[in-house]
Amino acid sequence: MIGQGFLFALHHMESWDVVAGLVGGTLAGYCIGSIPGLSSSIGIALLIPFTYGMSPITSIVLLVTLYMATEYAGAIPAILMNTPGVPAAAVTALDGYQMRLKGEAGAALTMSILSAGFASITGTLLLIGSSTWIASVALAFGPVKYFAIAVLGLSMVSSLSGDSMLKGFIGLFFGLAVALIGTDPMDGVPRYVFNDNLLSGVGFLPALIGLFALSSVFSLVEKSADMPAPLKKLPSVSGQVGLMRPYLGPLARSSVLGFLVSVIPGHGATISAFISYGFQKRISKRPETFGHGNPEGLIASEAAANASVPGALAPMLSLGIPGSASTAVLIGALTLHGVQPGPLLFTRNPEIPYSIFIALIVTMPLMVALGLAGTRLWVRVTQVPRSMIAGLVGAMCLLGSYASQNDLFAVWTTIFFGILGYVLQKAKIHPAPIVLALVLGNITESNFRRSLITSRGHLSIFVTHPFAVACLLVALAVFLAPFVRRAPAAAPAPAPSTH
Amino acid sequence: MLAIGLWFWFGAGWIQSQSRGLMSPIAFPRAISAMLVLCAVLLIARSLARGRLAKASALVSVERPWFVLAAMGMTILYPLLMASLGYYLATALWLPPFLWIAGYRRPVGIALATAGFLVFTRVIFQHVLGTPMP
Amino acid sequence: MRLRTWLSLFAAAGLAGGLAATLGGGVAQAGPAYPDHPIHYVLHVSPGGATDVMARKLGSVLQKELKIPIVIENRPGGRGAAEMAIITHSKPDGYTIGSATSTHLAEFHQTLRQYNIHSVTWVARLVTDPYLFVVPAKSNIHSMKDLAAAIKADAGKMVVAGFVKGSGANIAWEMFMSAAGLPASDVNWVPYNSVGGGVTAVLGGHGAATVAYYGLVKDQVAAGHLRVIGVIAPKRLADLPNVPTVEEQGYNVPTFWNQWRGIIAPANMPPAILAALDADIKKAMESPDMQAYVKNNSLQYDYAGSATFDTFIQQQDKVTLVWLKKLGFVK
């Protein structure tokens, strides 16, 4: 059955148009992904008009490859300049940028592309094997379970806080407070809206660009008199692949975890990356080195983010329900070509899902090859004077933020969060918990209230689902773990600060 | 220390604004602002306790404060320029001094970088993606 | 090959758009040859959603027809606030038009109170999306009467998963409740972030019913997961000949209450330009390309020129206000 589908789709794909779509999608994805402010959903949407004249297969191949490549390429500026090109890469930056500061930029880039490659292949195989039934499992997620899993996600703050738990919590609650701004998700009343532009809330992309990228531009300005960063030599291509050998365990775990999380509608690459990073740190033998350039953290984040692409496609292909913002846009693109993703897709247009599978698998070697070859080129960025980088990244941040909404208000948001991020950095409060809260704040609140409305205000609804109870208990344990651990070790050693 | 003050201010700010809006969806904001204030107070308490021991380490130091401030001022200026002059002219005027502040002092490099950036963004944003520039 | 043609077309559009922007639209005097330079089509949504995709499609058809670039601008800021600011600050010269949906009317009464229906010119209604009452296929509710009976039998317990309170879908539900003589509190309306979110919840068994659009449930109905029990429309839908309207089933609801998509422009537009614009858009909508798009997306082609559209808006606005007051969103 599956084999037949593949042959059928291959038959449809035998044309130069499709090959051009594959290559074009990959290249465009690399460009869009590495520009902060242009996330995969915006990239896909902006390229839809190009597909008007193409066949449905060529256009879906182009857009899916683009989606894939964009999710990876965001890691490149995240590692080199602490400037996540896509939201999920903010997690990659936590350890990736630290590795670059130690002169391991080449190794970090190599590991990121290889993790991404491995994860997407794993994710795609999982997708092919399970897309129909796993999506129905995802449907069973009602408000209570959504709330529970969102809380579990928030509890990952304890893995992101760096030296001080308290500062992590401050970041988290600040982020949650910012996420409240805008129109209330349930009743439509404005909250904390002192400017009409805030009615739709604080823009996530502009805030992210400010917190990570613009604030590091200010740090670069501060330190511009320093010497250029050291750069260790990169081994040969076979040696590059060998870099991964010690980390196969985390790689496989994070890929599967990233896929599973992203199957739940609404949980895209960013949440997958956060959960996977937090989980990896929990079980790591050296958790204290996370955030100081531990390759495990980099791999956990990249693998999960890239496995989430096939993950998000599962509910879209089998149920017509978008698993992420980008798949929502893909659904729009498909309907434009007269193809309706949903329960009838496999019987009505079998060539579409199978050509997506093939595109995902075929793109991967292309992406990895481009990534490995490109690594040698991209590491040169570290040799460009810091002052020059500061200037260009600063301008790119502001422009990218503008382009994400076509609005100067977005630029103001970025500037506000850029200055805030810089001040917080001075106070040793890391931006990652804030970003985590911005991603999850809305999901947490609306599902909490949705559950309560369903039960007419009875809190007991949260203990009626075993899965939800398990999630909430684990979250509680994760929240409390650092305090419990600290108690016996009375005075913690002063945290080593790298810079 | 500076940031602690900032946080406290934030916490207070949130309380005030939520008592103003007495609509039904306020339970969540109230809980969050309470937690935020609690954390800020804890942080102050802890840094006061620890501050006696190691005052020096708690102090925030900025290496080139004037340049950082200038850079921040410049970023604030940028959207204003964009709004009145349009993107291309604003960037052509803005990028060179920003690069200078960042510490890059070679005029040829500055000119090349500015021109390159303008051409690059024009190709990507306007021609390929069709983003309307101000 | 085709890709290249499109690439160059788009490059040309971008270039022309850029030129127009640099000129500041200084030559806005619309002579007899309207339109003679690029038209800016401002959208209140981000790229990628249903409204955006349709607007882009319409833009490309109009562009072919008029041989004038149509520049699509997404201004999603502030739930329509950014778009409205541009529309109300532009000249009514026909070179700036915008997208509108029924949500605009509700926003005028709630969050964007500085505007009202007279702040813009209502150029044309393009399509409508009637509200459908949907239940899971395995539910024993088969008609609106069954639904009313089920609600009465289980007063206050039935969970209805739908779009946020005060939305068009929510109002449609309340219209039925009041026509059936049931108090609103007899059901538990659990709000979701979108109409599609409500459909997903009902599919997953987290709600007993929802109010949705045909395009969102078409395949689920065909696959035997969901069932449509009634539709608010003047007559049965061509796609659903076996589903009676809510009115046919004995409930008196305003049959014109639906979700619509249209085009707006700055207020006080000269009649000549308005007529030209109306005619151009109508021609584009009637092209086989657009008709195929409308059909593929299960929308109802329901074009209304500026005069009809304006009357329709006044009617919708009145009903919107009445219901927002009843639901307590407007005092």
Image (tube, coloured by chain):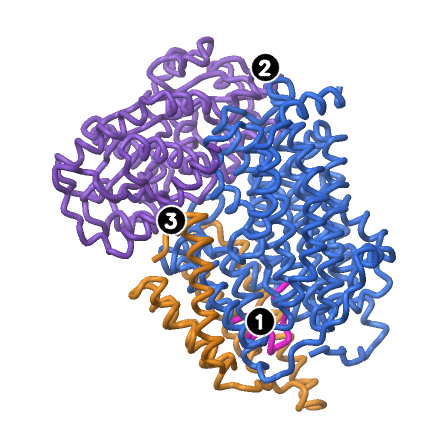
Chain colours: A blue, B orange, C purple
> Residue at image x 36%, y 38%?
C103
The picture places residue B128, in percent across and down from the top left corner, at 45, 48
The picture places residue A279, in percent across and down from the top left corner, at 77, 54
By secondary structure, the bulk of the magenta-drawn segment is best described as: helix
- Determine crowd level at label 2: few under 14, some 14-19, many 20+ residues with C-alpha closer than 10 A: few
Q: Is residue A33 left or right of residue C324?
A: right
Residue type at mark 3? Arg
Q: Is residue B26 left or right of residue A307?
A: left
Contact between marks 3 and 1 (CB within 8 A): the answer is: no
Q: Chain of mark 1?
A: A
User: Which picture quadrant has residue C248?
Assistant: top left
The magenta-colored residue range is A420-432
The picture places residue A5, in percent across and down from the top left corner, at 70, 22
CA gap, disc 3 and disc 1 = 28 Å
Residue type at mark 1? Ser
CA gap, disc 1 and disc 2 = 60 Å
Given residues C25 and C232, the one toward you in this image is: C25
User: Which picture quadrant has residue A383?
Assistant: bottom right
> Residue at image x 62%, y 79%?
B44
Label 1 sits on residue: A216
Label 2 sits on residue: C140
User: Nearer the N terminus, badge 2 or badge 3?
Assistant: 3
Label 3 sits on residue: C75
